[in-house]
Image: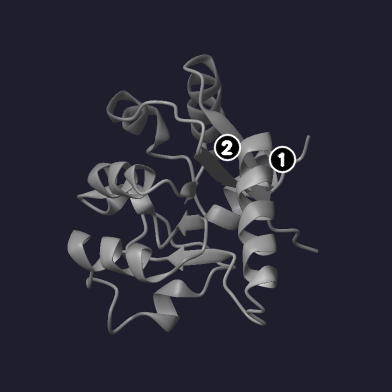
Amino acid sequence: MRFPLRLNYDLTKYIIGNKLKKVDKFPLVLMLEPTHLCNLACSGCGRIREYADTIQEMMSLEECLSSVDECPAPVVTITGGEPFLYPPVYDLIDGVLARGKHIYLCTNGLLLDKALDRMRPHPNFTLNVHMDGLEATQDRILERKGTIKTAIEGIKKAKALGFRVCTNTTIFK
């Protein structure tokens, strides 16, 4: 199954509820970027150039949770930069889950191993690890050797601990 049954159910209920209320347009996912900080400088990303003036700025935990409360979408994607560089990321995860939302936390996986010690699996929580191909391609794109091995070690540990993990891949020619 592509998506967990619980996510399918919650999305279906949300969509049907909006259709019955004759709501024409409604969000399905809140894309939350609490920080633009990243522990990489990937050649294909562009964040360093796009956010040069705001790279050090972060949303407060209160601003993040207020955004979650304001947006009726059943899914929150926590992204950035690298979410594990956001100091209150674990409080953010707990706060979003306490609101009954689904989370896709998008990470490059380099900090995943240590982060797993501070998190617990939850039916509404998915780790989404960004992978850019096989080892040589990933290391070239991320401009750092060993990134894929580090990410895969984190993925294996996450799976062993019972976390749901998926990957996101950018295809480069």
The one of 46 and 155 positioned closer to us in this rendering: 155
Numbered badge on residue 148: 2
How crowded pointer 1 is (Cα within 10 Å; few <14, some 14-19, many 20+) is rated as few
* Residue 57 in sight here: yes
Q: Position of residue 131 (x, y in %)?
A: 63, 46
Q: Amino acid at mark 2?
A: Ile
Q: Residue at horizontal 36%, vertical 71%?
A: 70
**What is the quadrant of residue 135 in the picture?**
top right
Q: Position of residue 18 (x, y in %)?
A: 63, 69
- Image quarter (top left, top right, bottom left or bottom right) of the N terminus: top right
The circle drawn on residue 134 is: 1
Q: Are marks 2 and 1 in contact (CB under 8 Å)?
A: yes
71 with respect to 131 (left or right):
left
Q: Residue 63 location, x and y as percent?
A: 23, 68
In the rendered structure, find residue 86 and report the number of the disc placed on it: none
Of mark 2 and mark 1, the one earlier in the sequence is: 1
